[in-house]
Amino acid sequence: NLESNHTALNLQVSRRFNLLIITVTPYAGISMESSDLKVGYTVTNSGDPLLEGTNIALDMDGKNKGRMTAGMRVGLLGIITVNADYSMGKYDAYSVGVGLTLR
């Protein structure tokens, strides 16, 4: 048996500023998170009478309970975008991205 539950509630805000051929969009967010994982197994047909019928169980709760994110997206000529952000939580994370928009 495998049971996994995950929940994330997020609030995000941003504001775009148009500066001639460049757009700048700072953004921020806060989230509340929870997760858990349960695994259970009963040994059958092992060939070892000492193991037969043994229950093996694992129960894990996620360590991350919340996260705050701040970042910025910069667009050039409406075609190229670059974004970078930093998230603070149990495990901090940086991310950077580059995009090409064709319309």
Image (cartoon, rainbow, N blue to C red):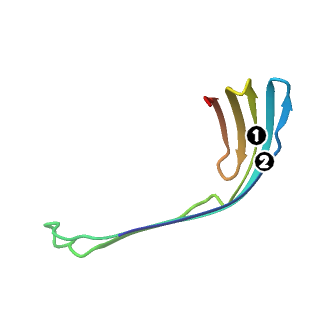
Identify the residue at horizontal 80%, vertical 40% (top origin): 26
Q: Quadrant of the N terminus?
A: bottom left
Q: Say few, some or many: other residues with alpha carbon within 10 Å of mark 1 (under 14 / 14 to 19 / 20 or more).
A: some
Residue 4 location (% of width, % of height): 47, 66
User: If the image is split into quadrants, where does the C terminus sit?
Assistant: top right
Q: Label 1: which residue?
A: 71
Q: In this view, does 51 lie to the left or right of 77?
A: left
Amino acid under label 2?
Ala
Q: In this view, does 26 lie above or below 42?
A: above
Which residue ends up furthest to the bottom in the rendered image?
53
* Up-down relation of residue 9 to residue 15 (above or below): below
CB within 8 Å, label 2 to label 1: yes
- 83 and 70: which one is in front? 83
Q: How many marks?
A: 2
Q: Identify the residue at image location x=85%, y=24%.
A: 20
**Of all residues shown, which one is farthest toward the left?**
47
- The Cα–Cα distance between marks 2 and 1, rounded to whole angstroms, is 6 Å
Local packing at callout 2 (Cα closer than 10 Å; few below 14, some 14-19, many 20+) is some
Query: Circle 2 sits on which residue?
Result: 28
Occupied quadrant, residue 97: top right
Q: Residue at x 16, y 73 (%)?
A: 49
* Kind of residue at badge 1: Gly
Provide the secondary structure element on which disc 1 rests: strand
- Viewer-closest of 24 and 21: 21
- Left or right of 27: which side holds 91? left
Query: Which percent across, then down, holds residue 42?
Result: 28, 72
Q: How far across and how far down the image is residue 88, in percent?
A: 72, 48
Q: Which of 19 and 58 is in front in this view?
A: 19
